[in-house]
Image: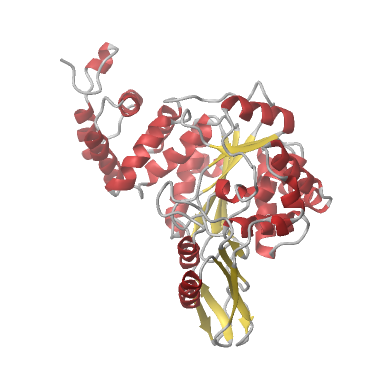
Amino acid sequence: MLPAGCGGTRKEERMSAVDIIVKKRDGLELTREEIEFFVRGITSGEIPDYQVSAWAMAVLLNGMSAQETTDLTLAMAHSGTVLDLSGVVPLAVDKHSTGGVGDKTTLVVEPIVAACGLPVGKMSGRGLGFSGGTLDKLESIPGFRTNLSREEFLDHLKRYGMVLTGQTGELAPADGKLYALRDVTGTVPSIPLIASSIMSKKIAAGAQAILLDVKVGLGAFMQTLDSASELARLMVAIGQRSGRQTIALLSDMNQPLGNAVGNALEVREAIDTLHGGGPEDFREHCLVAAAHMLMLGRKAGSLDEARAKAEEALVSGQAWGRFKQLVQAQGGDVRVVEEPDRLPEAPLKEIVPAPQSGYLAVINAREVGETSVQLGAGRVKKGDPIDPAVGIVVHRKVGDRVEQGQPLFTVHASSQEKLDAAVERLLAAHQFSAEPVEPLPLFYGVITEQDILQKE
């Protein structure tokens, strides 16, 4: 009898799950064949959960090389359907954010890039914990469909040059099984497993060029620049080894991005930005991300030229037109985005004044995000209901001078009890200094394929 998970070729017959676990436990490098064997076992269920969990812990403790992580990524991508977009559009780009608070950039960046003639095929996820999800935001728009089929995804990409939908179970099913186990076995923080999870879904979704927005700080999964840089470098290396043009931005997430945190509130802020308004930091972030995507898609010869094209798409209203087209194509009520007052509104709203004068030293993004979850804007576990109307609008940024009594933040709540609890927690999340405080940077750096090749 063959060990669990074995079967097939003679080479596979000589492999066993336990030998692969022991090899990684001892800090040795796994071969591509061993990784593919193990991933097939995860997908089929032939390798039991307790062995997958033991292997994940060994990876967490001993790490993986860039080649191992690439092999794992490709094996997980090929555990299900891998879309080929080359027959639909000449080149498609995708964007992935590692999650943050107030991060509604996709709602602005995708229309900008599409308006510049570069197709964007994006599959997004839902929010979990303090990190908001793009799909949840879009579902604030009545009728907007986030469950397009594979055929609809390809048709929309070909017809409109842009599509934004949820990930299907056909894409990287091994990753779904592995992540469910990582979530309950304390192995979520493994950088090789994070990188392969993200990149396997991006590769399976078919885009030939990928922009990675890796968040750093209190409201990010990577709270230090070193850990964020390590993750970004590994994902760019995977992209390079997998034949995908990839670049990573290291962006700040110590305070919320923009002002709005909460689904309908963030949609409203994105609409305002598409009309040429919106918070300065959010608008700048979107333009930088769009410019890099245009460079990846060879729509500009320099970053300055790409930036100018992105600005023109925004200022001219072309990006706004593409956003409306996206909403209409996916079944959303265009009247709601044309008249944002039709978006869901919370029954209770309270503007909270600054309790003292001074310079804002901290606006703890994680606390703001977790408070929005308590209000009902996010979910603690998969399947939790979302209230699209509730959330928070922060009116200040780190480094701002604030006078006592000036508006500090506004809470949108469904009950007085939740509103009161949110006010208390948000006041504690804002810290003041008597001395001037430097504003936080938007970005800490850019990691390109050239950076990876030079290091190698």
Q: Is residue 263 left or right of residue 365?
A: right
Residue 455, image x and y in percent? 48, 43
Residue name at image x 38 percent, y 42 percent: 192
Where does residue 431 sit, x and y in percent of width and height? 50, 79
Above or below residue 8? Residue 361 is: below
**Going by the picture, which residue comes out furthest to the right?**
316
**What's the residue at 64%, 83% (across, down)?**
406
Residue at 72 percent across and 51 percent down: it is 336
Pinpoint residue 269: horizontal percent, then vertical percent: 68, 59
How many marks do you count on the picture? Answer: 0
For this rendering, which residue is in front, 297 or 409? 409
Residue 231, visible in the rendered structure: yes
- Figure check: 256 above or below 209: below
| Direction left: furthest residue | 1
Image location of residue 309, percent across then percent down: 78, 47
Q: Is residue 208 left or right of residue 229?
A: right
Report whether 206 appears left or right of 336: left
Q: Is residue 330 above or below residue 227?
A: above
Point out the image quarter for the N terminus.
top left
291 or 258: nearer the viewer: 258
The quadrant where residue 35 appears: top left
Q: Does any portion of residue 447 appear in the rendered image? A: no
Q: How is the image coloured?
A: secondary structure
